[in-house]
Image: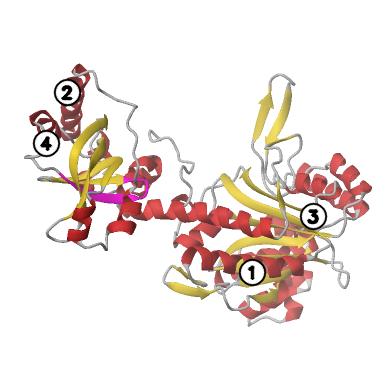
Amino acid sequence: MKQEILTNTSSDDLFAQRRAKLGEWRDTGHAYPNDFRRDSLAADLLAQYDQEAAESLLQKNKSVTIAGRLIRHRSSFLDIQDMSGKIQVYLDKKKLSPELWEMTKKLDLGDIIGIEGILFKTKTNQLSINVEKLTLLCKSLRPLPDKFHGLSDSDKEQRYRQRYLDLISNEETRKTFQIRSQLIQGIRQFLNKEGYIEVETPMMHLLPGGALARPFTTHHNALDMELFLRVAPELHLKRLVVGGIEKVYEINRNFRNEGLSTRHNPEFTMLEFYQAYADYHDLMDLTEAMLRQLAEDILGSPLLSYQEKTYDLAKPFRRLSVLDAILEFNTHYSMKDFTELSSLKKIAEKLKINADIIASDSIGKLQFAIFEETVEQNLLEPTFITEYPIAVSPLARRCDKNPEIADRFELYIAGRELANGFSELNDPEDQAARFKEQSLAKEKGDHEAMTYDKDYIIALEYGLPPTAGEGIGIDRLAMLFTDSLSIRDVILFPLMRPENE
């Protein structure tokens, strides 16, 4: 498909023919006009008049003005597509001037045109516009995908590279990004109603922090210093809670210098929110309510269909600890096997877990690695996993009953992590000690470990009230709501290798 669109001989010939037509149009002095104004959208006209009887519509003599892309041309009937959908227009040779009729013969699929005319119903009862005036607004020099059947699943790479063609050709793609937009609007409405304040925090940081991730680096010339693109807004948002903004959120772009997969893009969108005088149980309740509300508002039902399986968000989400989840999906082992270092190492070696984790002698890191390897993909129904090892939760509050685990949860749906939240660590001395541990890990070669952030410790020393915070991946949420298998399907312009590579 890529070659048919861009480079083969027939396309080159069509390109030349269209340029010749554009040249003729330029000679008239009216190429690329900018004074056309529409008063209607296709979907609005269909919603208002599609059910009206033909005779009643004829009596109204309703004049409308639309504009959009020509996507189908068959005899005297054209289909015009705008941002809302498509509508049919009719060219009646008897009613058009000879000049206008000749001009319609030079139209090509993909041309952007303006139409003025009268609404009517065809013999097959299809709402249409009887053209009285047609204006060529923009000539499409390149042909649309073959027969306008759109770019197929086998052309996914080209769909990502030339998203504009994908959007023109595929209604499902346009619907996907409409739903993504509705999700973000719905999140804002929900959190604003709950009393949260939306803010913006820096994308360029002096120190990378707020998540275990490898950052992108850049250089500021005027100040002659290295900066890091944001891996998470967490530490800045918690500074705001220190400052008295007790319910705060940001829908933010994050950048992590990691690999590409169906679930990962180096540049991605997150929702992060923090609430003072709350703990992680409060945020689990809020998250469950928010997702249920989003489904009702956007999909019209709490039932979420993803990859041929239906998930009922109206049901209470399951809550399960990390250790209990490991035992549930590794029934041939006992609790003792997952709490003693020697047996954990044997299991990790059998699962071929990273040698550095095995060598770390950290029970918590080994438990979490085994969880990721054997449990995550099996968590299909909406499930909150709780009680994470403190060793993999450097910003979370220790559990009062067991200091080796954190007051933390992650939400899984369809075998994918969707959210991460915890009761925040507000003890500055404990946080300083954990930063030091992270710094030592970084010195030993852990590129994802955090840096010691002295200013954040100072902020904590002024006093962070008991607080809970959470991050939700907007891209993964959009994947669920649009039944998309790859994160690239819900990012308009995903990162791609250059075509020549």
Cβ–Cβ below 8 Å for labels 3 and 1? no
Q: Is residue 84 magenta?
A: yes
Q: Nearer the viewer, mark 3 or mark 4?
A: 4
Left or right position of 179 against 167: right
Which mark is on residue 345?
Answer: none
Q: Which residue is mark 4?
A: 96
Q: Quadrant of residue 186?
A: bottom right
Horizontal and vertical percent position of residue 279: 80, 65
Which badge, 1 or 4, is on the more N-terminal residue? Answer: 4
* Distance from the alpha carbon under mark 4 to that under mark 2: 24 Å
Left or right position of 271 against 11: right
Q: Quadrant of residue 339?
A: bottom right
Q: Which residue is mark 3?
A: 395
Amino acid under disc 1:
Ala
Which badge, 2 or 1, is on the more N-terminal residue? Answer: 2
> Is the residue marked by circle 2 packed among few (<14), some (14-19), or many (20+) residues within 10 Å?
few
Q: Nearer the viewer, mark 3 or mark 1?
A: 1
Amino acid under disc 3:
Leu
Q: Nearer the viewer, mark 1 or mark 4?
A: 4
Quadrant (top left/top right/bottom left/bottom right) for the N terminus: top left
The magenta segment is: 82-90
